[in-house]
Amino acid sequence: MSNPLRGVIVSHAAVAKALIAAVENITGVSDAFVPVSNDGCDRDALFRMLAEAVGDSPAVLFIDLPGGSCLTGAVSYARGRPELAVVTGVNLAMLLDFVFHRDLAPLAAAQRAAAAGSRAIRTPAA
């Protein structure tokens, strides 16, 4: 892939911006993600924002919750577009993994990020 893969974080309110700020602070990488909030928008407005955020490049759409308007809008937008992949339940661990593996194809990057995010979820012993 000639250009690094783009990540689009789709969230309620300002969750996406906060996650991006954390990733940038930890990694120093500032061009990996674009935030999209569904705050105050309908499906058509969400589609327009996704189109602007994705542009003409392959991308992975990271969704805050595994249900709801952000997910249904993103899945509908990505349907029929093999250059897009969708991951739900976004967390910091998956975003950090993604930053350093943006040379992968969208589906491979999404699967890798999801695995990293899943491995980070645990209940440590006291």
Image: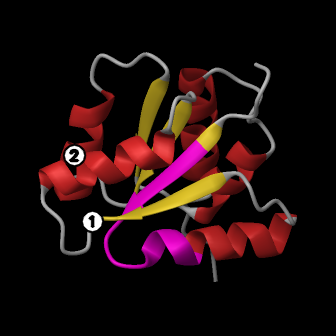
Residue 24's label in the rendered image is: none
Report the front residue among 19 and 119. 19
Residue 68 seen in the current view: no
Q: Check disc 1 and give the amino acid type.
A: Asn
Residue 9 placed where, x, y %?
Answer: 48, 56
Residue at left 57%, top 26%?
A: 106
Give the quadrant of residue 126: bottom right
Other residues around mark 2 within 10 Å, as few (<14) / some (14–19) / many (≥20):
many
Which residue is the site of mark 2?
73
Report the front residue among 104 and 83. 83
Residue 88 placed where, x, y %?
Answer: 39, 48
Q: Is residue 119 left or right of residue 26?
A: left
Other residues around mark 1 within 10 Å, as few (<14) / some (14–19) / many (≥20):
some
Q: Which residues are magenta?
A: 7-18
Residue at left 62%, top 68%?
A: 20
| Above/below status of 14 relative to 16 | below
Mark 1 secondary-structure assignment: loop
